Image (cartoon, rainbow, N blue to C red):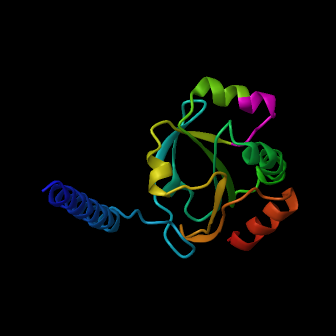
Amino acid sequence: MADRKKRLIIRTLIILILVAAVGFTIYQIFNKKHVVEIGDTAPDFILTDVHGKKVHLKDFRGKAVVLNFWATWCDPCKREMPYINKVYEKTKNQKDVVILAVNIKESKFAVENFLNRYHIKFPVLMDKKGDVMDAYNIVPIPTTFFIDKDGKVVDKVTETMPSADYLQKKIEKIKP
């Protein structure tokens, strides 16, 4: 009798585990997030920059847009920020190029300290709730999108950019 009871418990546990695995698989299939890839239209958003100004991505149609997602605690982000800043200083007066950085879920205080420490001059937008990060399905950071004048993603870099020249070459490919 004791053996029968043990077998019944083991069988019940196996069935429960199988049902849970199937349920999880079905959940994953239906909750799959769209990954923004090359050729996709860049998801539109409105965010506020560190100075309180609202920035709407669609306002930059007709221009080349570099959209970088980053965080202050991210060491690879710290390494590429000087490169982005250097290219921004070269391109800031060009009317057909826009460089935007989206900070992910951090306080304004932390972001401003970072910007001051690294002497960052380019526009930094605050994604406090992570909505834009979710829309672009950002994993890992840094992730940088290169968006053409029509709002299409032309390139995507999911690692640290190795140099300012590398970034400049990417921008040249998307300029109108």
Question: Does the magenta segment cover residue 115?
Answer: yes
Give coordinates of residue 50: x percent, y percent: 60, 32
Residue that lies at the very extreme toward the front in this rendered image? 1
Q: Nearer the viewer, residue 58 or 17?
A: 17
Query: What residue is shown at x 77% (from left), y 28% (from top)?
Result: 116
- Of residues 25 and 154, which is closer to you in this image? 25
Question: Could you tell whether 106 is left or right of 164 in the image?
Answer: left
In the picture, measured across the screen, residue 144 lies left or right of residue 135, that is right
Horizontal and vertical percent for residue 36? Answer: 51, 66
Q: Is residue 19 visible?
A: yes
Residue 42 in percent (x, y) is at 51, 64
| Rendered position, 161 above or below 155 | above
Picture residue at 12% right of the left edge, 56% below the top: 1
**For the point 61% across and 55% down, which residue is it?**
140
- State the image coordinates of residue 16 (x, y, percent, origin top left): 23, 59
Name which quarter of the figure residue 158 lies in.
Answer: bottom right
Magenta residues (range): 114-122
The question of residue 136 being in magenta is answered with no
> What residue do we see at 85% from left, 56% from top?
164
